[in-house]
Amino acid sequence: MTTAVLGAGAGGLAAAVELTRAGVDVRLWNRNPARLDAHRESGIHYTGVFGEGSVRPAGMTSDLAEAISGVDAIVVCLPSVVHPQLFADLAALAPTVPIILNPGHTGGALHLRHVFTAAGVPLPPVVEFSTLTYIGRVQGGVVSIGGRAARVTAGALPGGQPALRRAAELFPGVVAAPDVLASSLANVNLVLHPPGAVLSVAWMEATGGDFRFYVDAMTPSVVRVIDAYDAERLAVAAAFGHQLPTLMEEMAALGSVDIDAAKRGDTGAAIRGGVANSTIKAPDSLQHRYYQEDFGFGVLPFVELAGIAGVPVPTADALLQIGATLTDTGLLTRGLTAERLGISGLTRDELISMVRD
């Protein structure tokens, strides 16, 4: 099998490592060739859950057309802030093979569908993952893979069953969701990052992020906001007909929290006790993805979905407004609005019909 992996950050490199080790011919693409240059001579060096070593993908390129030509699947491992340009570029090439968004964040598949539809391009099979399958960081040209999700929720757009099957072949642990609303609302970072990012912002600015986000920033007050926000997420999911796991249940399945604390329902202790995230530092500026991505491409589409579902989400509304003010108000127009998701003006039943028919 030949697979294009789009993105050479921690997620894309981790995917290239796992897939290459499994015998898949990987073509690694990145828009900026400098990201690839560090791996051209000696391959991708890695440490962590897959051991320590290096792999050499079948190819590396900054030419998107070359990367996806003749492949059996396209795996997108990129932050959602770059999805608008990437999806437009993919639409111009009109691929027909399955596209796997690893992850889709919140609304990724709907966003891709809207871009392709607006361009008049037939939509290929599309599946989105609720979260990235890896916890990783790149340091000194080495990708450190601290965790690999034991289970990940995957939702396909109508006609996307081939993408779901291919995703399960490539990434063991994929569990099918009824639709992309379920997978989008199962995004753990949607709930996990924004409360801590907002409520520890003064600490971040004073220290340059010199504290552990998943340990030091998870104080009792922050955890209360996380729990309230998670209750809103579950209510929105229920309005669309989905009984989703709680944040703790989802993270326990991923393997990123302390299992015993999660079983007790102790959100703070569970997050603080998670080994995979324990050393990750807080954001060092408002340009960090916890602000630029998780608000405009997480909280915003969630609030839009909540509006269509008819469910009040005061905690999410407050986080979104404060997050937009902290960064800049353009976040609310640059992010995934209902228009960019292609769902503006739809009723709840019309949206459900669109994602399931």
Image (tube, rainbow, N blue to C red):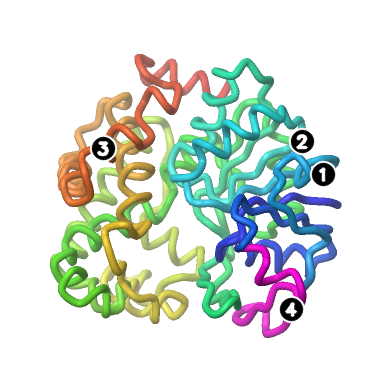
Q: Secondary structure at mark 1?
A: loop
Residue at left offset 33%, top offset 42%:
296
Residue 34: where, in percent of width, then height?
A: 61, 62
Check whether the beta carbons of the residues at disc 1 and disc 2 lie within 8 A of each other: yes
Reading the chain from its start, which is encountered first: label 1 or label 2? Answer: 1
For the residues marked 3 and 1, what is the alpha-carbon distance in whole angstroms? 37 Å
Residue bounds of the magenta highlight: 35-53
| Residue situated in front as seen by the camera: 235 or 218 | 218
* In the displayed structure image, the side of residue 205 where residue 189 appears, left or right: right
User: Residue 53 at what x, y percent from top left?
Assistant: 72, 83
- Residue beneath disc 3: 330
Residue under label 4 = 54
Q: Mark 2 and mark 3 in contact (Cβ < 8 Å)?
A: no
Q: Is residue 40 left or right of residue 207?
A: right
Mark sitting on residue 71: 1
Label 3, residues with CA under 10 Å away: few <14, some 14-19, many ≥20: few
* Residue beneath the point at 85% across and 41% down: 70
23 on left or right of 61: right
Front: mark 3 or 1:
3
Type of residue at label 4?
A: Ser
Question: For residue 200: magenta?
Answer: no
Task: Name the front one of labels 4 and 2.
Answer: 4
Q: State how far apart marks 3 and 4 are (Cα).
A: 41 Å
At x 44% / y 45%, what residue is drawn?
81
Of the pair 174 and 332, the residue shown nearer to us: 332
- For badge 1, the amino acid type reads Val
What residue does disc 2 label?
Answer: 97
Q: CA distance from mark 4 to mark 2?
A: 28 Å
Residue at the (30%, 32%) spot, across then down: 333
